[in-house]
Amino acid sequence: MKTLYLVRHAKSSWEYDVIDHQRPLNERGLSDAPLIAAHVAGLIETPDLFMSSDAVRALTTANFYAKAFGVPTEDIRLNHDLYDFDGRQLVREVKKLPNAHDRVMVFGHNHAMTFFVNEFGSKPIGNVPTAAFTAIQFDIDDWENLNKGTTLHHIAPKQLK
């Protein structure tokens, strides 16, 4: 049994003249990310692995989760291939996960997150909002055998406000 926790980065800012990869979170993102991270930390076991896109907004979101779970931020595995917007690379990266990890949390971007939760989860979600958390459990022992799973949770920040 494997469980994947998918987190779309929190709301980012368009206020700064930086390349997309370097965009930071905006004020709403900086309040939503720790709110939902704290809620999720009280809901699930600590993941075996935290893996994030290396984009600033995704890593900042991942740092809030690491803090909520009491995991050193240095333990977050950065993966440039998660800087993915259509979902194909996200699927490839999940299938390459080490089987020693049964519970993995991935921080990334839309539309990759929306594609993944609709393609592999059991609950249709029109669009995964910023900072949303989705948990999908798979009846597999090997990540390479990724198939349709069961959506256990889908939580957006507005549900907690």
Image (cartoon, grey):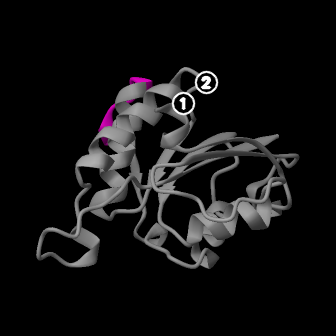
Question: How many angstroms separate mark 2 from mark 1 (CA)?
Answer: 5 Å
| Label 1 sits on residue | 40
Q: Are marks 2 and 1 in contact (CB under 8 Å)?
A: yes
Question: Residue flagged by tag 1: what amino acid is it?
Answer: Val
Instruction: Specify whether 108 is left or right of 116.
Output: left
Q: Position of residue 71 (x, y in %)?
A: 39, 29
Q: Nearer the viewer, residue 30 or 63?
A: 30
Residue 70 painted magenta: yes
Residue 133, compared with residue 88, is above or below; it is above
Quadrant showing the N terminus: top right
Residue 25 visible somewhere in the drawing: yes
Q: Residue at point 64% right, 61% down?
A: 94
| Label 2 sits on residue | 43
Q: Position of residue 14 (x, y in %)?
A: 22, 70
Instruction: Specify whether 56 is left or right of 47.
Output: left
Q: Nearer the viewer, residue 48 or 117?
A: 117
Q: Based on the displayed image, in which of its 4 quarters is residue 137 positioned?
A: top right
Question: Residue flagged by tag 2: what amino acid is it?
Answer: Leu
Q: How many marks?
A: 2
Q: Based on the displayed image, in which of its 4 quarters is residue 101 positioned?
A: top right
Magenta part of the protein: which range? 69-74
Residue 106, compared with residue 47, is above or below; it is below
Q: Secondary structure at mark 2?
A: loop
